[in-house]
């Protein structure tokens, strides 16, 4: 009677490398890529934001290693091959298939005009999944090598390339404030001042309730008018400010710097500056 051959047990390299690479992708490389590419959008440093991911990353590491170790004990080379194929696609999908769908302003995406992008991703995913499943023994060694090189290269770019600052513009340069100007800003004019205060993320009705129930707080704003029904044209602070000053709302897919540069001379603050009136934009984060 012919003895049945037992499936070969994969080495411990498979679950260890798989766990490390998956955790690196979801909790290190991908978040750091987003944070450093948009550093000017975040008020907190990257190290502080990344700190919130430590505990989830540890829990995910333990769970992933247990599952992959069970897969190793069962001797499923094909299972590991499919796992690394999916990991390869996740990397490509995040760092390469980053399509420009415009600004996410809450309006529905125009999927019909972007269907080709979905087809490209589907073809790539189907190809990787098919090769990893039907040619597991040949695919797995190359997949490990390719993923290792890609992750090492991405890690070097992420850690050593640094942050991407906000694109400079003439409007931003004109509105920038130096430390020497702060005292002058707070001194105001001895004749007449026009001060526009935006509540930003402060809910309107909550602020109104505070004013109505706190005479002390109301006394802080003598001469001010509270516009209860004021509504911005865009769910983004800087774009809302610009649309209020110019009366020209932003419409994607125009680039934001292009919109600001195109409409800045239509702002009423620009007209005031031409008449010799000092105008300053005061950002509390920069004071």
Image: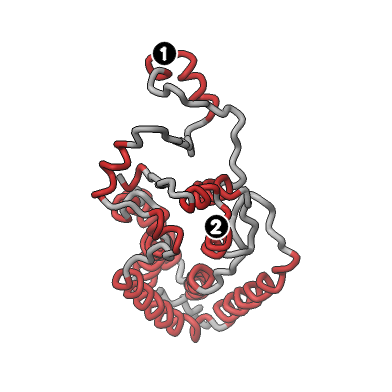
Return the mark for residue 215.
1
Expressed as whole percent of the image width and height from the top left, the position of residue 41 reads 42, 54
Which residue corresponds to the image point at 32% horizontal and 48% vertical from the top-left?
Answer: 286
Does residue 115 appear left or right of residue 155 in this picture?
right
Give the mark nearest the N terminus, 1 or 2. 1
**Residue 141 locus on image (x, y percent):** 43, 83
Q: Using the image as rendered, state which of residue 110 and residue 8 is in the foreground.
A: 110
Element class at badge 1: helix
Which residue is the extreme one toward the right?
Answer: 112
In the image, what residue occupies the spot 45% across and 64% down?
169
* Quadrant hosting residue 114: bottom right
Label 2: element kind: helix
Name the residue at 41% across, 78% down: 150
Q: Is residue 235 above or below residue 93?
A: above
Judge the density around disc 2: few (<14), some (14-19), many (≥20) Cα neighbours within 10 Å: few
Write down the residue under mark 2.
Answer: 265
Does 247 appear above or below 118?
above
Q: Which image quadrant: the C terminus?
A: top left
């Amino acid at each position: 009677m012919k003895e049945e051959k037992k499936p070969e047990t994969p080495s411990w390299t498979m679950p260890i490398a798989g766990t490390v690479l998956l955790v690196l992708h979801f909790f290190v490389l991908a978040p750091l890529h987003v944070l450093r590419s948009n550093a000017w959008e975040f008020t907190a440093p990257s190290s502080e934001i990344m700190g919130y991911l430590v505990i989830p990353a540890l829990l995910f590491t333990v769970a992933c290693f247990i599952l992959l170790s069970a897969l190793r004990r069962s001797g499923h080379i094909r299972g590991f091959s499919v796992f690394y194929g999916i990991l390869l696609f996740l990397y490509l999908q995040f760092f390469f298939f980053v399509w420009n769908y415009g600004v996410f302003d809450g309006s529905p995406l125009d999927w019909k005009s972007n269907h080709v992008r979905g087809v490209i991703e589907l073809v790539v995913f189907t190809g990787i999944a098919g090769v990893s499943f039907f040619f597991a023994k040949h695919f797995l060694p190359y997949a490990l090598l390719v993923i290792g090189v890609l992750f090492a290269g991405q890690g070097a770019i992420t850690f050593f390339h640094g942050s991407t600052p906000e694109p400079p513009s003439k409007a931003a340069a004109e509105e920038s404030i130096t430390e020497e100007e702060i005292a002058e800003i707070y001194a105001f004019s001895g004749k007449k001042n026009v001060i526009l205060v935006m509540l930003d993320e402060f809910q309107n009705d909550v602020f109104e309730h505070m004013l109505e129930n706190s005479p002390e707080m109301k006394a802080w704003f003598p001469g001010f008018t509270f516009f209860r029904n004021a509504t911005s044209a865009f769910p983004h602070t800087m774009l809302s400010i610009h649309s209020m000053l110019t009366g020209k709302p932003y419409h994607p897919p125009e680039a934001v710097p292009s919109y600001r540069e195109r409409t800045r001379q239509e702002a009423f603050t620009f007209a005031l500056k031409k008449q010799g009136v000092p105008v300053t934009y005061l950002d509390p984060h920069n004071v």
